[in-house]
């Protein structure tokens, strides 16, 4: 066994990364990551860093690539609450107006001393 690693994927979502790692490791493929620490601390850096790189051993690369090729793509385009984006927008607007609290009225202070003109 050589200690050489090969990058098999760049993942931008930490939850997806955890699922893919656990899935590969459950099939006996050892994985490691590059850049996971940076993204764990500041997630907006994921795009700037090119995602978290998922690596496997060179001897496991062919098997891991075959397994990953059979995965259905993760869909980020799902709606927040439902499958209809129009319903989502209406729900978000309704929640905004129901929870919106106007700022307090600006009432000038009352001074009980005589003020100079």
Image: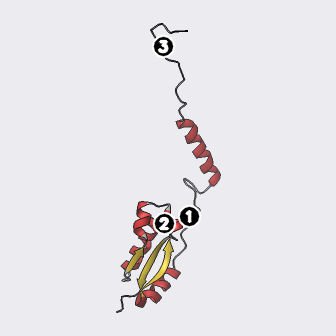
Q: Position of residue 60 (x, y in %)?
A: 41, 88
Residue 13 - label: 2
Question: Which comes sooner in the sequence, label 1 or label 3?
Answer: 1
Question: Which comes sooner in the sequence, label 1 or label 2?
Answer: 2
Is the residue 55 above or below the residue 98 in the image?
Answer: below
Residues under numbered marks 1 and 3 in contact, where contact means CB atoms less than 8 Å apart: no
Gap in angstroms between the C-alphas marked 1 and 2: 10 Å
Instruction: Mark 1 vs mark 3: give the one in front.
Output: 3
Question: Which comes sooner in the sequence, label 3 or label 2?
Answer: 2
Q: Tell which residue pokes out farthest to the right in this image.
A: 86
Q: Which residue is mark 1?
A: 76
Q: Nearer the viewer, residue 14 or 74?
A: 14
Q: Position of residue 106 (x, y in %)?
A: 54, 23
Looking at the rendered structure, the secondary structure element under dot 2 is loop
Residue 110 - label: 3
Residue at 51 percent across and 77 percent down: it is 71
Q: Quadrant of the C terminus?
A: top right
Residue at 41 percent across and 61 percent down: it is 41
Looking at the rendered structure, the secondary structure element under dot 3 is loop
Q: Tell which residue pokes out farthest to the top in this image.
A: 114
Q: Position of residue 44 (x, y in %)?
A: 50, 60
Instruction: Mark 1 vs mark 2: give the one in front.
Output: 2
């Amino acid at each position: 066994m050589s200690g050489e690693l090969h990058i098999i994927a760049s993942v931008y979502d930490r939850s997806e990364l955890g699922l893919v790692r656990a899935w590969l490791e459950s099939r006996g493929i050892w994985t490691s990551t590059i850049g996971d620490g940076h993204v764990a601390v500041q997630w907006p850096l994921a795009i700037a860093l090119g995602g978290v790189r998922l690596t496997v051993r060179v001897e496991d690369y062919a098997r891991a690539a075959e397994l990953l090729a059979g995965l259905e793509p993760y869909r980020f385009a799902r709606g927040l609450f439902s499958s209809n984006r129009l319903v989502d927008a209406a729900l978000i607007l309704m929640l905004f107006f129901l929870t919106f609290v106007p700022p307090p009225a600006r009432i000038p202070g009352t001074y009980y001393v005589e003020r100079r003109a």
